[in-house]
Amino acid sequence: MSRTGREIRIAVLPGDGIGSEVTAEAEKVLAAVGERFGHAFRFEQGLVGGVAMDATGQPLPEATMALCRSADAVLFGAVGDPKYDDPRASVRPEQALFGLRKGLSLFANLRPVWVHPALVDASPVRSEVVRGVDLIVVRELTGGIYFGEPRVESSERAIDTMIYTREEVERIAHVAFRAARNRRGKVTSVDKANVLACSRLWRQTVQAVASQYPDVTLEHLLIDSATMHLIRRPRDFDVILTGNQFGDILSDETSVLAGSMGMLPSASLGQRPAAEEGGWFGLYEPVHGSAPDIAGQGIANPLAAILSAAMLLRHSLQMEAEAQTVESAVAAVLEAGDRTADLVIAGQKAATTQEMGDRVVEALAAGRGEA
């Protein structure tokens, strides 16, 4: 048993492509955490995405939803399969993510971006620009244009609608301001208030919420300016708060800073407590997709999935020491020069997916990188 006095249930949804490869390494690291700290983790797998469509005809079977609802947290891989790529299809693997977000009330997406000193040269952005970058994108996840009312009126005309309520904006704004209080005390709210009515409501609501956090500095940026400044002066950002569509774009842009999407974890949080400690219920996944072009080759970078597991420990289980231990182990492996194919510089030998996971487990067991 764990120190919580019970078995901790983790729903594992590997999904498609490299999803199964990277989640296997994250699961291995969590098992090592359990062994070191005396926790009993129980991993239960479910079908999602293209593999679920192959087996059941649906990207998100009810059995998978039931598994997630009964778990303490969800560890997710990736969805997407080339054979289901027709955008006109009524059922697609990617619909599983929207269903999980809605069905589990996962309204807050957190995507931290920290450029490790050992990876400064891996970024295509100049080293003097990316060195020291440490920011987090807080993205609203269940509203906006992705959850509007799309309709195709004819072969010449299609419509998507964007809807936000004051309550939805207030809810995500509080998440961002509370995060800023534990960081450097700055929130940058990104919108398109000069054009969109939803963005004007967004800006007004965020400004009102800011009055409850006098210790946090708030600035507003338009999305077009934000995309430029995120590359030109990324160190100026602390917490970026934005809506669903803009957050999707900005958080993918940050992968350029880190050198690879294979380094970026994420957490999608809801309101239901996950355990006695009172943590968030959450779904944790690497930012990268299913990468079918490299699936099955054993060359995918598992660090984003492993760092997502660290976020699971922190946010859902409130195991801060354990989360920091995983992050320290990842840092130690990078400092030792280990790299997967997406991060190698000319002349370096690339580690396989499994080898990278093994090295993180070894560093964790040895306590390397810890203060």
Image (spheres, rainbow, N blue to C red):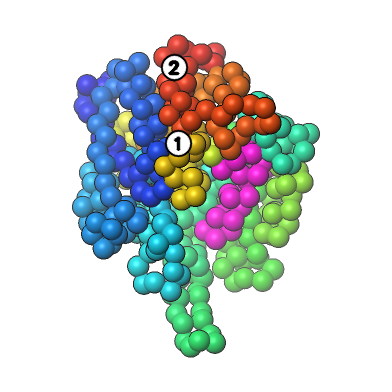
Which is more N-terminal, label 2 or label 1?
1
Residue toward you, 248 or 295: 295
Q: Residues within 10 Å of mark 1 (few under 14, many from 20)?
A: some
Q: Residues within 10 Å of mark 2 (few under 14, many from 20)?
A: some
Q: Position of residue 324 (x, y in %)?
A: 48, 23
**Residue denoted by label 2:** 362
- Label 1 to label 2: alpha-carbon separation: 19 Å
State whether residue 156 is above or below residue 135: below
Q: Quadrant of residue 364?
A: top left
What's drawn in magenta, residue-wise?
A: 237-261
- Residue for point 48% across, 88% down: 154
State whether residue 306 is above or below residue 169: above
Q: Quadrant of the C terminus?
A: top right
**Residue denoted by label 1:** 298
Q: Quadrant of residue 131?
A: top right
Q: Amino acid at mark 1?
A: Gly
Residue 241 on the magenta span: yes
- Residue for point 49% across, 49% down: 293
Residue toward you, 7 or 55: 55
Q: Amino acid at mark 2?
A: Glu
Q: Quadrant of residue 124?
A: top right
Q: Secondary structure at mark 2?
A: helix
> Which numbered disc, 1 or 2, marks the residue closer to the eye?
1
Tell me if I can see residue 7 in this picture: yes
Relative placement, left or right, of 293 versus 3 is right
Number of the label disc, if any, that sits on residue 192: none
Relative placement, left or right, of 286 versus 41 is right
